[in-house]
Amino acid sequence: SFFSFFYILLSPDGRFVATLAGHPPILKLDSAGNVVERLGRGAYPLGVKNGIFWEETHGELEEGEQLLLHSDGLTEARNVSDDELGDAYVENVASRHQGSSAQKLVDNLVTEWRLFTGGRPPEDDVSIAVIGKVSRRGT
């Protein structure tokens, strides 16, 4: 058996290290919701092969920036015409919601996914997480 995972170790100053196994790249969004970086690259899920090492990605999250993580079940979701939602659609949704809180961006992505699929049950798991760096007022 195998499973996909990602981990992100965040420091209070915004620095992070991340590793992906069987997940799409992490999207780093600027304060306008534009993708400024795709972090990580395709790697086997855990348990598929022995002796595999997964690349660590290092970066820094500035105030107003967000990291968008999702499973491939989001981008590979299909509508009634059998078209995939796709990476470009996810990035478009993010860019239309500039300055949104992490929760609001997740809510918007879920709404758009449901509209696209017409409410059909998912064929694969769909997970979405958004991590944002907010200002620490008074410090």
Image (cartoon, rainbow, N blue to C red):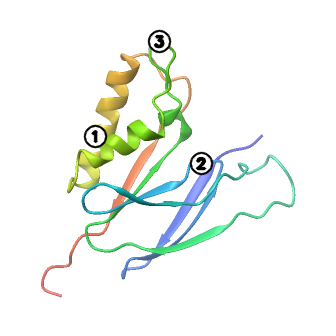
Query: What type is the residue that disc 3 sits on?
Result: Ser
Secondary structure at numbered mark 2: loop
Secondary structure at numbered mark 3: loop
Q: Earlier in the sequence, mark 1 or mark 3?
A: 3
Query: What type is the residue that disc 2 sits on?
Result: His
- Displayed quadrant of residue 2: top right
Numbered disc in front, either 2 or 3: 3
Residue that carries the numbered disc 3 in the rendered image: 81
Residue that carries the numbered disc 2 in the rendered image: 23
**Residue ID at (31%, 31%):** 112
Q: For mark 1, does the 10 Å Cα neighbourhood hold few (<14), some (14 to 19), or many (20 or more) residues?
A: few
Residue 46 in the image, given as x and y percentages of width and height: 73, 51
Residue sitting at the far top: 80
Q: Quadrant of the C terminus?
A: bottom left
Q: Earlier in the sequence, mark 2 or mark 3?
A: 2
Residue sitting at the far right: 50
Q: Is residue 138 left or right of residue 71?
A: left
Could you tell me if the residues under marks 1 and 2 are in contact, i.e. CB atoms within 8 Å?
no
**Residue ID at (21%, 75%):** 135
Q: Which mark is residue 107?
A: 1
Q: How many marks?
A: 3
Between marks 1 and 3, how big is the CA–CA gap?
24 Å
Between marks 2 and 3, how big is the CA–CA gap?
25 Å
